[in-house]
Amino acid sequence: MSDASGMSEGELKNKTNVLRQQLDHKEREIKALYQEMNLHNNGAKEHRAKRDELNQQVKELKESATQLRNKRDEVNKKIAELKKQRDDVRSNKDGYTDKIGELKKIRDNLNNIARGRLESLNEAYRSELEKISTADIPLEYEQSLMKRLGELGGRLKAIREANTIHNEMGGIYGKVTEFYQEIDTFNALIHDLASESQSYHEDMLDTYGKMDELRKKSDEFHNRLLEIYEFTKPIKEKIDAAKNAVSQTREELDIYLDRMKEIQLVKDQKKQEEKRVSAKDKFQKKGRLSLEDLRMLMENDEIKFG
């Protein structure tokens, strides 16, 4: 800090003029820097507003994508439940199908034993039975007929059992048909739900794509904003340095101004004293005073009125 106590009034005036010029120069410099800063800040405001707007859109799209994903997952959950129910039906159907396979083998074996239709076998059996009822047939022929009747009886029994199994298989085929119809119903429901799920999934992917595009644009504005911050950083540093210089210069100027005030006060006091002495001298010599001289003498108790 400067020492102004030993400086003359002229030196003080010169110093204060120099400091005022420095202040004026620095203030104009600060004003110019602020104008330059404001030009860049206007661009920064636009970039920041655009970035924030895009980020808000991304946030809204994210909420939409989350809703789409939840809907898709809910539909997929229903699909999984329907598939489980369909698999249960298929399992039951497979059990009946296996039963049909087993019965088919037994029926086919019986048909192989029967080697004919029930009607034809019944007709053959009745024919042979009528023959054996004839009283005058030879013994050997009768024995042959009995053997033939026994064979036909076995074949008849086999065809009847085969027909019974065939009828049972028909009922099972009806049940299997019901299972296939039920499976077809499940498949149709699953197909419709899969289409719905795919629609949600595609909408979700489309939303994510839009989010990526908006993020890229937001990043562009953010990077431009960072570039502006980086560019204006030296300007801000210059402004801060100039402000600091102004503050220091004002403090220094105040010291010299205070000293000048002190000198002026002494001069004023000396001038007043000279006026007081002159007024008193006039009063003593002439006995006449101006109003200003009278006021001064009264203030200094040079004249008193009883």
Image: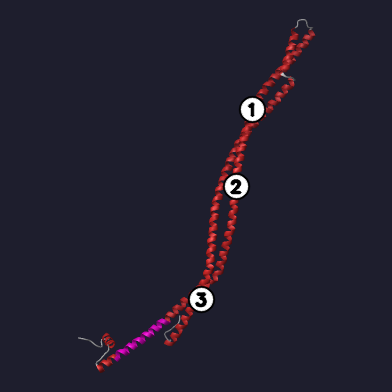
Give the structural element (helix, strand or loop) at label 2: helix
Give the color scheme: rainbow, by chain, secondary structure or one colour.
secondary structure
Asked whether the residues under the numbered discs 1 and 3 touch, taking CB atoms below 8 Å apart as contact, a structural biologist would say no
Q: CA distance from mark 2 to mark 1?
A: 40 Å
Q: Is residue 196 left or right of residue 118?
A: left
Rendered view: 246 above or below 93 = below
Q: Residue at x 55, y 48 (%)?
A: 67
Q: Which mark is residue 201?
A: 2
Residue 185 at least partly seen: yes
The kind of residue on which mark 3 rests is Glu
- Taking the magenta stretch, the answer to whether it contains residue 167 is no
* Element class at badge 3: helix
Check the image and report above or below for 191 versus 66: above
Q: Tell me where residue 90 appears, x and y as whole percent.
A: 63, 34
| Quarter of the picture holding the N terminus | bottom left
Q: Which mark is residue 29?
A: 3
Magenta part, dominant SS:
helix
Q: Secondary structure at mark 1?
A: helix
Q: Which residues are magenta?
A: 256-278
Q: CA distance from mark 3 to mark 2?
A: 60 Å
Q: For the residue carrying disc 2, how many other residues have a C-alpha within 10 Å: few (<14), some (14-19), or many (20+)?
A: some
Using the rendered view, name the quadrant where residue 217 is placed. Answer: bottom right
The residue under label 1 is: 174
Tell me the residue at 66%/30% (across/down). Answer: 97
- Image coordinates of residue 174 in percent, x first then y, are 64, 27
